[in-house]
């Protein structure tokens, strides 16, 4: 066996780099463990990390070995029991070397436990929300000057050293030296010519005082020429940046939850877990997404996050009250030209018979023309009722912008959530 030794110096944050490489290598195993973990969690501990185990056989490292060279002739023995096409019997379990399965440990040899490690909160949420996005998200017109992008805005005299434009600074220095030295050089040349002319005269006609005067002038001009700086603060130029307003991709998510008497506590817990997943997803991936929480029974009310998840108010069921309040809030605070509007609704499907038709009309006539996406989850193990039927007609009319899923038990929450908000290929 040959060993390859990597003698390169370790980079900074070596442990963090190695950990990220490990997470990438065993991504499929970790993601499977994360999905199983989500179904076991309660509402209040969705944000903590997770301990993940990987089978020891899956973390084996590749090795290099010398193969047997030359020509080899091998004779493989046959068998007296089987012929082509025979089916082999499955080995029986029970340990003791009789086959696989739960049984007693071997009385000889060694083994390895599964490799276990802990994911941090950030790493856990990365795997939970991998591949998810808000569908049909668009940039909107300028409505908020706080969202800007720095762009190049020419060259100026003021700035920080990190943004100095060296080429322009040297060009300015060169031009300044030419401009400042030109009259000095001209005077120096004239003084040198006058000195040469005076020195070429006959010794009787020379003027010694004039010669001394010209030499002194030449010396002074040369000192002035040498005193011109190679570069001066006046020459420095800096790249300028200007804040250019950018179209905003901000969005608002309306969370509508049915808290009527027909919603049992188990149904409400499932709805809360669904909305908590949605809340964590939006908070983590989108800085400029606002959340509006609406609870309803016979009457709808806009509430804060605390009341939405923990209030115990209940009553009858009129779903149209929530959709009507939703429309009012949009008209008052969120014009569709400035915002991407999303709605997620959770209900058990129970509603007054006549009200389900009203819900469909509200969606078709008023809400769907304004919304980017509407996700409806029905939490019920029973047959669908009138509300689901009416929403089915809305989905047929509005295609991919209206999605419906059914949740029967807590284990369905994460798959349904991923189906509703999975990243879709651009058309």
Image: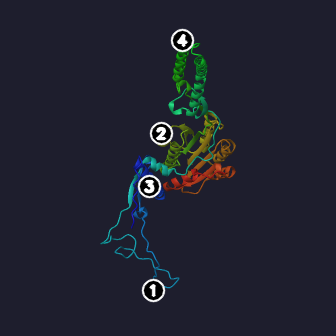
Give the label, 3 or 4, closer to the camera: 4
Instruction: Estimate how packed mark 3 is, as few (under 14), some (14 to 19) or many (20 or more) residues with alpha carbons within 10 Å.
Output: few
Instruction: Estimate how packed mark 1 is, as few (under 14), some (14 to 19) or many (20 or more) residues with alpha carbons within 10 Å.
Output: few
Give the label, 2 or 3, closer to the camera: 3
Q: Secondary structure at mark 2?
A: helix
Whether residue 141 is situated above or below residue 191 in the rendered picture: below
- 4 and 2 marks in contact (CB < 8 Å): no
For the residue pair 69 and 11, the one nearer the viewer reads as: 69
Sooner in the amino-acid sequence: mark 4 or mark 2: 4
Sooner in the amino-acid sequence: mark 1 or mark 3: 3
* Residue 343 x/y as whole percent: 59, 44
Whether residue 340 is situated above or below residue 53 in the rendered picture: above
Residue ID for mark 3: 22
Could you say which disc has been placed on residue 209 in the image?
4
Residue ID for mark 2: 306
- Whole-number angstrom distance, CA of label 2 to CA of label 3: 38 Å
- Whole-number angstrom distance, CA of label 4 to CA of label 2: 100 Å
Q: Secondary structure at mark 3?
A: helix
């Amino acid at each position: 066996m040959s060993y390859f030794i990597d003698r390169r110096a370790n980079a900074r944050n070596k442990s963090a780099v190695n950990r990220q490489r490990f997470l990438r290598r065993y991504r499929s195993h970790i993601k499977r463990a994360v999905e199983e973990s989500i179904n076991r969690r309660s509402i209040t501990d969705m944000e903590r990390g997770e301990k993940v185990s990987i089978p020891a056989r899956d973390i084996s490292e590749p090795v290099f070995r010398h193969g047997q060279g030359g020509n080899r002739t091998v004779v493989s023995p046959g068998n007296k029991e089987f012929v082509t096409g025979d089916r082999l019997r499955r080995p029986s379990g029970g340990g003791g070397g009789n086959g696989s399965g739960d049984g007693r440990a071997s009385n000889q040899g060694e083994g390895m436990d599964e490799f276990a490690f802990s994911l941090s909160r950030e790493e856990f949420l990365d795997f939970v929300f991998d591949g998810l996005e808000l569908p049909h998200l668009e940039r909107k017109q300028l409505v908020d000057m706080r969202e800007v992008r720095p762009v190049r805005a020419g060259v100026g005299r003021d700035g920080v050293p990190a943004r100095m434009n060296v080429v322009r600074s040297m060009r300015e220095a060169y031009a300044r030296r030419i401009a400042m030295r030109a009259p000095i050089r001209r005077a120096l040349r004239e003084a040198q010519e006058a000195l040469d002319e005076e020195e070429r005269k006959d010794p009787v006609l020379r003027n010694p005082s004039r010669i001394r005067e010209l030499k002194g002038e030449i010396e002074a001009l040369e000192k002035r020429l040498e005193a011109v700086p190679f570069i001066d603060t006046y020459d420095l130029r800096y790249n300028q940046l200007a804040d250019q307003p950018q179209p905003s991709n901000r969005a608002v998510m309306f969370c509508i939850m049915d808290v009527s008497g027909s919603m049992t506590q188990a149904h409400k817990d499932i709805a809360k877990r669904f909305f908590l997943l949605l809340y964590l997803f939006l908070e983590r991936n989108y800085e400029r997404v606002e959340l509006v929480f609406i609870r309803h029974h016979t009457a709808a009310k806009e509430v804060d996050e605390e009341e939405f998840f923990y209030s115990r108010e209940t009553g009858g069921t009129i779903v149209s009250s929530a959709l009507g309040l939703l429309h009012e809030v949009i008209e008052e605070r969120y014009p569709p030209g400035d915002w991407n509007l999303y709605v997620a609704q959770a209900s058990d499907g129970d509603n007054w018979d006549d009200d389900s038709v009203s819900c469909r009309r509200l969606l078709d006539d008023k809400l769907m023309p304004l919304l980017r996406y509407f996700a409806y989850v029905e939490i019920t193990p029973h047959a669908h009722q009138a509300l689901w039927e009416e929403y089915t007609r809305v989905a047929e009319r509005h295609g991919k912008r209206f999605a419906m899923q059914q949740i029967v038990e807590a284990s369905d929450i994460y798959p349904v959530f991923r189906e509703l908000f999975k990243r879709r290929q651009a058309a």
